[in-house]
Amino acid sequence: MNVGVVMWPILPWPEMGEQWKRAEELGFHTGWLYDHLAWRGHTPWDDAYTSLAAAAAVTSTMRLGTMVTSPNFRHPVPTAQAVKTIDRISGGRLTLGIGAGGTAHTSDGDVLGEEWPPRRRADRFAEWTGLLDALLTGTDVSHEGEYWTARGVTVSPGLVQRPRPPFLIAGEGPRGMRLAARLGQGWIANPRSPDAPMLPLLRSQLARFTEICGEEGRDPASVTRLLLTGFTPDPWPASVAAFEDLYGACAEAGITDIALHWPRPDSAWDADTAVFEAIAARCRELP
């Protein structure tokens, strides 16, 4: 499996740049950033796309990505332009994690002054994803939809990755999974079981996603299946042995990629730095 790391865009530059360099030195396949204005109320919280552009300039091998970009405050047109620019700066190392977005204010759920019920939120995200795909694969794109409008937009020329950077689509329900099967190069799993181990819920979600891929005529083996860790009691960063056990179980279940969190002191994602680096070293040896 590929192992990535979620970074925290809260340090001043160039300290943040040194952390990105260290993540690449440790061998992480991908570095991710939560795309929020202020995640769970934390400020300062730097912009994901600006930060990824800066990270692209100080790294050379690791892929970079959002976890996840949503329509909560991103319009598809400037988003597509930012995606194209980072793809060019990074030499084709950008992966776009996308999702419908959270509903809470601390997840930017109402910062545009509107609240969408679940069905309309899903409809809005599906239209947003389709338009973003069109903008990154076509020219002179126009769209008059229920939620989004674009008129004669061309942003795709110059993209390094063709036909566009890959989409990894987050979605725990059938509509999100179906969108991932149709338009995504990957699906993001984020089982939330704060009081119980993740594996039973994860296996259930993977089985459902495999079923939906079949219904959509998509080979599930062709789709990246990324697990975002850190939201269950499973002891990923406790020790190398604990990590190996969870890694093996997830690989057996069908996960292809995982994302750990960079240790963040005084938070739920704190971890012993020496253990974390030992886990990174072990990742380079695991199949």
Image: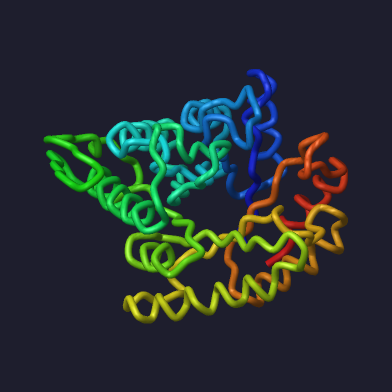
- Relative to 229, does residue 158 appear above or below in the rendering? above
| Location of the C terminus (image quadrant) | bottom right
Q: Residue at x 65, y 29 (%)?
A: 42
- Outermost residue toward the top? 13
Residue drawn at (54%, 37%) of the image: 105
Across and down, in percent, residue 172 comes to 51, 64
| Left or right: 31 as drawn, with respect to 151 | right
Image location of residue 234, percent across then percent down: 78, 62
Front residue of 263 and 121: 121
Looking at the picture, tell me which residue is in the foreground, 255 or 157.
255
Query: Residue 146: x percent and y percent?
Result: 21, 47
Left or right for 173, reference 275: left
| 237 shown above or below 77 | below
Where 180 sits versus 268, above or below? below
Q: Residue at x 32, y 50 (%)?
A: 124
| Callout count | 0
Residue 81 horizontal/vertical position (percent): 31, 32
Residue 29 to residue 234: above or below: above
Between residue 106 and residue 64, name the one nearer to us.
106
The colour scheme used here is rainbow
Q: Residue at x 66, y 77 (%)?
A: 252
